[in-house]
Amino acid sequence: MAQLDTRIPPRTVLTSPVHLLAFGLGSGLSPKAPGTVGTLAAVPFAWGLLQLPLAWVLGVIVVAAWVGVYLCGESAKRLGVHDHGGIVFDEFVGYWISCLPLMPALLAVSGFQGSTAAGLLLAFVLFRIFDVLKPWPISWLDRNVDGGLGIMVDDLVAGVFAALSWVVVSRLGVSFF
């Protein structure tokens, strides 16, 4: 479970490439709701990913997840705080996963017919719901997996749950926007 010690000096984060990336280019320094602010910071990157072919997006997500295990684990180790609340790289990748139903190659499957902006908002809301509420198995992963993998995995699964719930509800004919 994330510890909310936000007394990390901004200089520590902004001058170290590991911390800078783990803290979502500084978005994790927010004193209030760093996970939400970090997810907001991931939105423009998600929009950019939507411009790429699906195979590239999946490749970026896989590489970012693996790199994130290192970044988040190393940042936490250097700070001496497991899963510091400001470490939000995991939110970036989890949010990108939640945006997969917006990919042009997957729109027929997802059933989404709204605008890209509406889709990015829907992905944001669904991802934050699963990330904050942590239903099983997300809560189990959050409590039982350590290190960088532990920091990343609950958000990756939250992103999968958000994407799948979006598809299921859309396929049932519920219109979001």
Image (cartoon, helix red, strand yellow):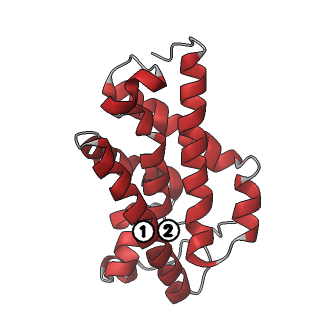
Which residue is at a point 44% across and 56% down the rendered structure image? 93
- Position of residue 41 measured from the top left corner of the image (x, y, whole percent): 36, 51
Between the residue at mark 2 and the residue at mark 1, the CA separation in whole angstroms equals 5 Å
Q: Are marks 2 and 1 in contact (CB under 8 Å)?
A: yes
Residue 32 visible somewhere in the drawing: no
Question: Disc 1 marks which amino acid?
Answer: Phe
Q: Quadrant of residue 168?
A: top right
Q: Quadrant of residue 99?
A: top left
Which residue is at a point 50% across and 73% down the rendered structure image? 69
- Position of residue 61 measured from the top left corner of the image (x, y, whole percent): 40, 56
- Position of residue 10 measured from the top left corner of the image (x, y, whole percent): 38, 76
Examine the rendered structure and indicate whether residue 39 appears above or below residue 65: above
Query: Which quarter shows the C terminus?
Result: top left
Examine the rendered structure and indicate whether residue 17 appears above or below residue 52: below
Q: Image check: 34 left or right of 136?
A: left
Q: Which residue is mark 2?
A: 87
Which disc is residue 71 wearing?
none
Foreground of the two, 26 or 111: 111
Q: Which residue is mark 1?
A: 23
